[in-house]
Image: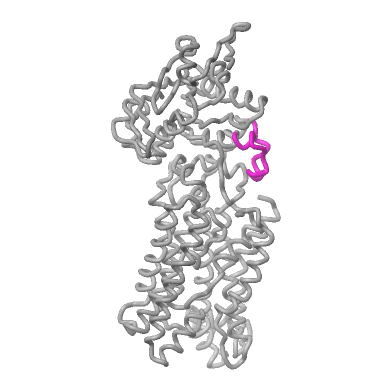
Amino acid sequence: MSLWVKDLRFDYRSFSLRVRDLRIEEARLTAIVGPNGAGKTTLLKCLCALLPVAKDSLFLGRRDIALLSAEERARLIAYVPQEHGSAFNYAVQDFVLMGRAAYIPLLSTPAAADVEIALEALAYVGLRRYASRPYFELSSGERRLVLIARALAQKSDILVLDEPTTFLDPKHETELMDLVRRLAVEKKKTVLLTLHNLDMAVKHADAIVFMKNGGVVAAGAPDDILDEALLESVYEIKMSILRHEGRRFIVK
Amino acid sequence: MTRKQRVLGWLVILFPFVVFFISLSVGVVRIPLGDVFKALLSPVFPAMKEGLPENVLGIVLGVRLPRLLLAFLAGAGLSVSGASLQALSRNPLVNEYILGISSGAAFGASLSIVIFRQSFPPQVSAFLFAVVAVVIVLAISRKSDSPIVSLLLTGIIVSAFFSALLSLVEFFASPYALQGLFYWLMGNLGWPGWGALSISLPLMAAGTAGLILMRWRMNVLSMSDEEARALGVNLGREKLIVVILATLVTSAVTSVAGIIGWVGLIVPHLVRMMAGVDNRRVVPLSAALGAGYLILADDLARGLAASFEIPVGIFTSLIGIPFFILLLRKSKRIWL
């Protein structure tokens, strides 16, 4: 399922987000990059209707996100926050099971099939063995995988991740990006994430969206849009793109 | 879930029923368990009445049964409300006291009892003011940057406000009414009369059942607001349902039994220590443990002194507060 930002406006105090006609292709990995305060996270939150969205501004496939019920939306788009805070230390499996909320009626409890889906999702991120461990006993890298597993249990076509690699060491960072890449390739999910690490974006993403001051500066495949002039205009510092063995590296 | 937890779970479920049955025999008049059993079955099998002392039927069915039913449902209801409100506010410290529900309900009920001489049902009045109190608390604390601190602070303030209103009602009450009011406020399960029970017991049962049905949802509702929304929860509506059910239960209990403190805080904590934090277990086990706990506390209340009863609310607080201090020392990490 593709995602279309037709005409999105969001204003908060002095900040204003304005994005027009941005298309996120299905079964692709799209990275949103840009300096702090560019509006990346705000855009993600609008996409998941965590912030109020006007009618006729955002479409999941052909469906206007403002007209969807909470359950309908959660079955189409899943959101992976950076961190999870709770006073209660749920077992990993119970935590992932919460991804099934949009499928389970208010007065009901998860069925065996839901548990199965949760365990499958855990297995996909490689943490099946931690199913009965308490969530807060895991390392921060593992917790982030659990958050992804919970989103997978939502069985949505679209997956949105807010800076999933922040605070991860290089090994976990790479593993996480490989996993996210597999979701787009193997599971045909439309994956959209924000990243701070430009090299990661260039290496893994099918498409990159450059944002600045609440607007989109450029969007497209890295090959088509990436050049030093763009980087300098977005980040306001001089950057060079080096090529080595067919890969590009960005040097500040 | 380990085997040990499962066995413990079943023991907790059995606990209130065993205590209930035994408590029917305890009191000023001791009745052998066999006679209790016969008396209980006598409405269905009249033959059972034979050989029973004359007063046994009256004591078991007319006095102790309704009282124990009230203790059972009030204990279950207060504990389930506490567990639910704790999940909802992501705060293990919250209970119906702290959200102002108890004081609002106490003021509402006293207003009906003292000023309107019960011409306006105390249950309705208690519920209305409990809702007013909890809505004020939630509305004020919602706007804050640190919701947990402000929830506790606002709760204390709103409780104090309704306590002041309650004092005002007490001030205008006649000495005779005042004595009754005082005794009632301390929390006691002494015979409120079938009239009041016939309204209150179904309200407690319905509210408790509703919250137990929502037990898994409490897990999802205990996530941050943003996460819960992203998971497909209609947050405003679902939180409102939980708050209304918990308020319904608490105000129904308060209107017939006064303020029975600390049950809603201690019982869910005990359950979490035994059975983990999954609300699919915490909520129903809290109901069972709370029912048994309040029946036991009431046994103490009516059994400790032979010639008079001590209000049960005093016992729940006397047991509850030391326990709470212990808890604060043990699990600091959770909320500080």
- Above or below residue A198? Residue B331 is below
- Left or right position of B52 against B253: right
> In the picture, which quadrant includes the C terminus of chain A?
top right
Q: Report x, y in % for residue B322.
A: 65, 71
* On-image quarter of the N terminus of chain A: top left
Residue most extreme to the left: A56
Let me know if residue B220 appears in the view.
yes
Residue B190 magenta: no
Q: Give the range drawn in magenta.
A: A126-144
Along the viewing direction, whichever of A146 and B52 lies nearer the viewer: A146
Q: Compared with residue B90, is residue A70 higher up or lower down, i.e. above or below? A: above
Residue closer to the observer: B223 or A241:
A241
Q: Is residue A146 left or right of residue B329?
A: left
Residue B154 horizontal/vertical position (percent): 46, 62
Q: Say whether residue B198 is visible.
A: no
B240 relative position to A109: left or right: left
Q: How is the image coloured?
A: one colour
Q: Nearer the viewer, residue B327 or A93?
A: B327
Residue located at (62% from left, 26% from top): A173
Please count the marks in the image: 0
Q: Position of residue B234 (x, y in %)?
A: 40, 46
Q: Where is residue A64 in the image (x, y as percent from the top left)?
A: 32, 31
Q: In front here: B64 or B332?
A: B332
Where B172 sits versus A245, above or below?
below
Examine the rendered structure and indicate whether residue A38 appears above or below residue B141: above
> At 61% across and 84% down in the image, what residue appears?
B26
- Farthest residue toward the right? B4
